[in-house]
Amino acid sequence: MQFLQRSVMILGLAACTVPSFAQELRNEGPVPTQATISVESKTDAPVDPALMKVEVNGHATPLTSLTKIQGSSAQIAILIDDGLRTSFDLQLRDLKKFIGSLPDGAQVLVGYMRNGTIVGERTFSADHAAVAGSLRIPLGEAGVSASPYFCLSDFVKHWPTAASGSRFVLMLTNGVDPYNGSVSVLNQDSPYVQTAQEDAERAGAAVYAIYYGQNGVRGNAASFSGQNYLEQVAHATGGQSLYYGSFNPVDLTPFLKQFNSDIRESYTATFMASTAKEKPHTLTRLKITTSQPGLKIHAPDGVHPGLETEQ
């Protein structure tokens, strides 16, 4: 009887170790990996994948496929800082038009950044009219978002998975990280911004940002700090940061058109990548360039190896 019990225990322990062992095997070698990239072109020439160069952790690797993203398969999260000045209500009409201009089938949601999380509907919908109808004036309370980077991290780490698609985020915020202390140009190395950036890279989300001033935070120093951080996150994830100097945009239309154009000119690049099995959560460094004249590639600086984004 004791022998039987001991045998059952050994078998049970062996069974418990299988998932862990399988996880290690999955991380031992290169696996097919995808990244969302956008193409900025000055010509009408089609993109030539043969002229693209992919580097993973500093080593050249073949581009196995390049597929243009259909707008109808995109997931677009519009995250609005609830601390924005109430004058932002003048921009709601432009945002409604933008949502209405998205391709049929594109999934979109509107959320408000408040107290380190996202308030509002957290389910993507292809009913663009209903989503546009959910837009409202921000609360306009100073510091209500806590930090837009806490909010971004929270959202991308819990990206709604009910539907699949290429991931895009549009942040409308002043970009200031109040938890990093002074907004001085000598204090522009926030661990919270870095964490948000890496969380977005792991989730495979391209982050775009439109700078917009907030109540309670004024002056050129604050605008420089916020724009610098937004540029950091956008560049690292393959997106873009859009702003007019230190002033709030009078009209969001040009920025929204740029964002819409980038979505329509985005591609899924597939290649092989691996990560150290002892550090499975470490991002793999990525660099994608092209020698094609008149073409510029916007790609994330890091990816999580594998075809499934990390949750």
Image: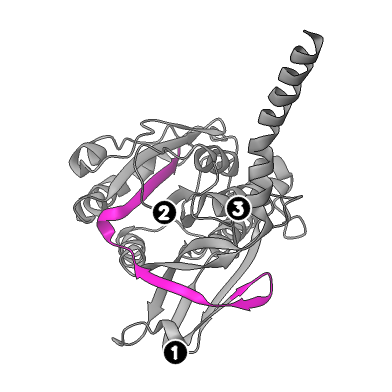
Q: Position of residue 233 (x, y in %)?
A: 58, 57
Q: Amino acid at mark 2?
A: Phe
Above or below 153: residue 263? below
Q: Is residue 96 above or below residue 3?
A: below
Number of labels in the image equals 3
Residue, disc 3: 197
Q: Earlier in the sequence, mark 2 or mark 3?
A: 2
Q: Are marks 3 and 1 in contact (CB under 8 Å)?
A: no
Secondary element at tag 3: helix
Q: From where the camera sits, is residue 239 visible?
A: no
Element carrying mark 2: strand
| Quarter of image, res 253 | bottom left
The disc at residue 292 is 1
Whichever of callouts 2 and 1 sits on the residue coming sooner in the sequence is: 2
Structural distance between the alpha carbons of marks 2 and 3: 13 Å
| Residue at 40 percent of width and 72 percent of height | 66
| Dot 3 crowding, Cα within 10 Å, few <14, some 14–19, many 20+ | many
Q: Is residue 101 visible?
A: yes
Quadrant for the N terminus in the image: top right
- CA gap between label 2 and label 1 equals 25 Å
Q: Is residue 247 above or below residue 131?
A: below
Residue occupying the point 25% across, 50% down: 99
Q: For the view shown, which residue lies furthest in the top direction?
A: 1
Which quadrant holds residue 261?
bottom left
Q: Disc 3 versus disc 1: distance between alpha carbons?
A: 29 Å
Task: Identify residue for label 2.
Answer: 168
Quadrant hosting residue 47: bottom left
- Please report the residue visible at 54 percent of the width from the left and 55 percent of the height from the top: 306
Question: What's the magenta region?
Answer: 55-81
Secondary structure character of the magenta stretch overall: strand
